[in-house]
Image: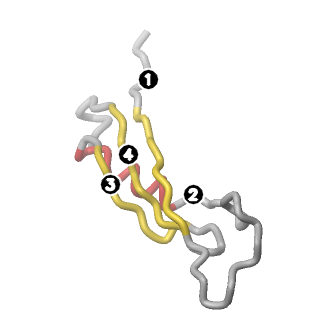
């Protein structure tokens, strides 16, 4: 739909990542409504390294090892030549 409407732009997404590096939730922060679904789908396909973060110590029992991050997707139409 966005491609047919010739819409391009930037979408900012907040992702929630579990202990295994899997994106378990993605929420739109900003961006064109026609581009949002594609950005969410892309974010949910991302995988983070298991050992993310600067602190490499083993977490204490019951300590949550999940994290959040912000990802920016830029959607551009191919240039017409």
SS for tag 2? loop
Q: In this view, does 14 lie to the left or right of 5?
A: right
Q: In which quarter of the image is the C terminus?
A: top left
Kindly indicate the quadrant of the structure image that contains residue 67: bottom right
Q: Which of 53 and 43 is in front in this view?
A: 53
- CA–CA distance between discs 2 and 1? 24 Å
The residue labelled by disc 2 is 46
Choose between 65 and 36: the one closer to the eye.
Answer: 65
Above or below, comparing residue 42 to residue 19 in the picture: above
Q: Are marks 1 and 4 in contact (CB under 8 Å)?
A: no
- What residue is at 62 percent from the left and 60 percent from the top? 47
Mark in the foreground, 4 or 2: 4
**Element on which disc 3 rests:** strand
Q: Which mark is residue 37?
A: none
**Numbered tag placed on residue 78 in the rendering:** 1
Q: How many residues crowd around disc 3 within 10 Å: few (fewer than 14), some, or many (20 or more)?
A: some
- Percent x, y for residue 70? 46, 51
Packing grade of label 1 (10 A; few <14, some 14-19, many >=20) is: few
Which of disc 4 and disc 3 is earlier in sequence? 4
Helix, strand or loop at mark 4: strand
Residue 72 % position (x, y):
45, 42
Q: Distance between the residues labelled 1 and 3?
A: 24 Å
Residue 78 drawn above or below residue 36: above
Question: What SS does tag 1 mark?
Answer: loop
- The residue to which callout 3 is attached is 28
Is tag 4's residue or tag 2's residue first in the polypeptide sequence? 4
| Cα–Cα span, label 3 and label 4 | 6 Å
Q: Name the residue under label 4.
A: 12
Residue furthest top in the image: 81
Q: Mark 1 or mark 4: which is in front?
A: 4
């Amino acid at each position: 739909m966005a491609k047919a409407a010739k819409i391009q732009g930037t979408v900012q997404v907040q992702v929630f990542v579990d202990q295994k590096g899997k994106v378990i939730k993605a929420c739109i922060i900003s961006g064109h409504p026609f581009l949002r679904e594609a950005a969410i789908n892309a974010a949910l396909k991302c995988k983070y390294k298991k050992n993310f973060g600067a602190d490499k110590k083993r977490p204490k029992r019951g300590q949550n090892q999940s994290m959040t991050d912000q990802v920016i997707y830029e959607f551009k139409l191919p240039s017409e030549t």
